[in-house]
Amino acid sequence: MAPAQQDNVVRSAGIVSASVLASRVSGLVREILMARLFGAGQAYDAFLLGFRIPNLTRDLFAEGALSSAFVPTFTQYLSTRGREQAALLANLVATAVMLLVGGLCVLGIVFSPALVQLLAPGFRNVPGKFELAVTMTRVMFPFLLLVALAAQAMGVLNACNRFGVPAMSSTFFNVGSIAFGLTLGFLVGPRLGFSPIEGMAYGIVLGGALQLLWQLPSLHSLGFRFRPLWDWAHPGLRQIGRLMGPAILGNAAVQVNVMVSTNFASTIHDPVTGADGPVSWLSYAFRFMQLPLGLFGVAIASATLPAISRSASLGRIDEFRATLSRSLGMVFLLTLPSSIGLIVLGRPMIGAIYEGGRFQPYDTQQTALALSCYAIGLGGYSALKVLTPAFYALNDSRTPMLVSLASILINYSVALAMVRTGTLGHAGLAIATSAVAVFGFVAQFWILRNRIGGIHGRALLRSVLQISGACAAMGGVVVLTSGTLQGWLGVGRAARLIDLALSIPAGAAAFYAVCRLLKVAELEMAGRALVTPVLGWVTRRRARI
């Protein structure tokens, strides 16, 4: 593949990454507010479960199976049949989503008690906790329909090479959920008779509506306007349905893993304090890991999928292979050092951001322990974001499904072993999640490599080894710098902020220097892709002057 074409993918990923950064920062602000207002206990555990249930079905039907099946098919229609036929397919899919996912929301509201019992039977042991979780679930279930429509809008825009607006939609969700939640929970709620945590739940739904509305003007500017259409025999819709069947089963396996972890976590009580917080600790830690996962894994995957879908639809397998290999290399360049950073600096990060109010130092310690275990699988988790859609681009949704089903056994076995031994408690569940991520990456990479005749594996392995060497150097610098600063400054909030402000740049400088010394190809490609637009902008400005 030509360097310019590789650079386009990296530049698109950069646009998505910048937008995702805003999303993750706003999401972190929401988490900080929730931590300060509700801590790690009954109310927030119930809120998390109520939010998690529509999130599980969202991953299952919306951003998971629907996006994976819709984007390659829509890109194929856009590339080979024109914008009019692509717009027709988009309207058919939107109508089907409203009917099917809307019906699912109604069923979810009716059967919320059964869903809560299935996911967290331990909640019945705490008076009022089960009932509160049921209320939270019923309030937030309509969020599923809104986010399904937003995911389809995102797929259309990405296929048209519009990445910034859809990536920013999550920021509008976070900002909207905060603003509406605080208003309803603490200003309007007391007058209407519902609690602050219920107000935050209503804020989630209104934030989901804002996430969809934000993308509509961009769709209209491209000529895509919704009109309800029914044609269940349409070949494009049927192709999406065929791809979604195995995709739903594959994503169901992922959700089963989440259910297993939540089920185990709801039964764990801290042996030291008897605290009822493992569900919250795991959630705070995983939310923290979402920052590098979104910035790098999701961003690169979002930019890669339309490119490899076009290559596959036009039969350009060499181009497909090269794009995929470079994208994986970029994932490892960015996520492996992030993993080391989260492991070494997790405690000062979490303490500086979350600690305060109801979030106590012990919560910081336990959340940091879970984060370090999650970080082990960050590279594999991010690489899966790129690999899984590659199968869908090849019209193969069966392979990711089989790998996901196999992961159920691995997750359950590791989680059960960790809980029974009791040595790591909730952190053992994070290790099980990381084990699933690593297994999924290895299995999918090996299968896809055999199917398309290689993914430039030797070059990718060389890059990974070089990046790992740079990570080792970075880790040594960060451990030395952070340990020295903690010895001098202690562990107060100001001390932690100073630690992070000095240790992170020192580690990044060491990583960059070693990568330059080793001539890591992905680093040079990233620099070229990001510097070229800036130089072009400067040249155009000078020409105008």
Image (spheres, rainbow, N blue to C red):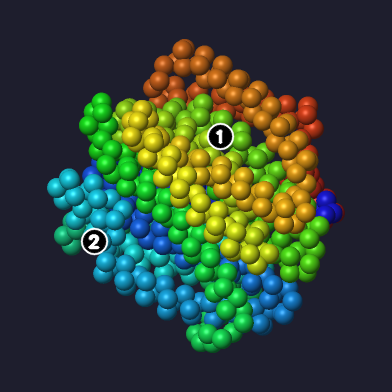
Quarter-wise, where is residue 185 in the image?
Answer: bottom left
Q: Mark 1 and mark 2: span between their CA atoms?
A: 38 Å
**CB-based contact (under 8 Å), mark 1 and mark 2:** no
For label 1, the crowd category at 10 Å Cα-Cα, with few meaning under 14, some 14 to 19 and many 20 or more, is many
- Residue found at x 61% / y 20%: 477
Q: Position of residue 196 (x, y in %)?
A: 24, 52
Near-viewer residue (310 or 173): 310
Residue indicated by mark 1: 339
In-image side of 497 versus 476 (left or right): left
Nearer-the-camera pick, 499 or 144: 144
Residue 397 place in picture, x, y as percent? 59, 64
Secondary element under disc 2, as helix, strand or loop, is helix
- Quarter of the view holding residue 105: bottom left
- Quarter location, residue 369: top left
**Residue for point 52% across, 69% down:** 245
Query: Which one is earlier in the sequence, the residue at label 1 or at label 2?
Result: 2
- For mark 2, does the 10 Å Cα neighbourhood hold few (<14), some (14 to 19), or many (20 or more) residues? some
As drawn, 389 above or below 224:
above
Residue 10 appears in the figure: no
Amino acid type for the residue under numbered disc 2 = Pro
- Which label number is shown at residue 113? 2
Nearer the observer: mark 1 or 2; the answer is 2
> Which residue extends farthest left?
127
Residue at position x 51%, y 51% in the image: 406
Amino acid carrying label 1: it is Ser
For the residue pair 174 and 413, the one nearer the viewer reads as 413
Task: Answer whether residue 463 is visible to the viewer in this image.
Answer: yes
Picture coordinates of residue 363, whole percent (x, y): 33, 32
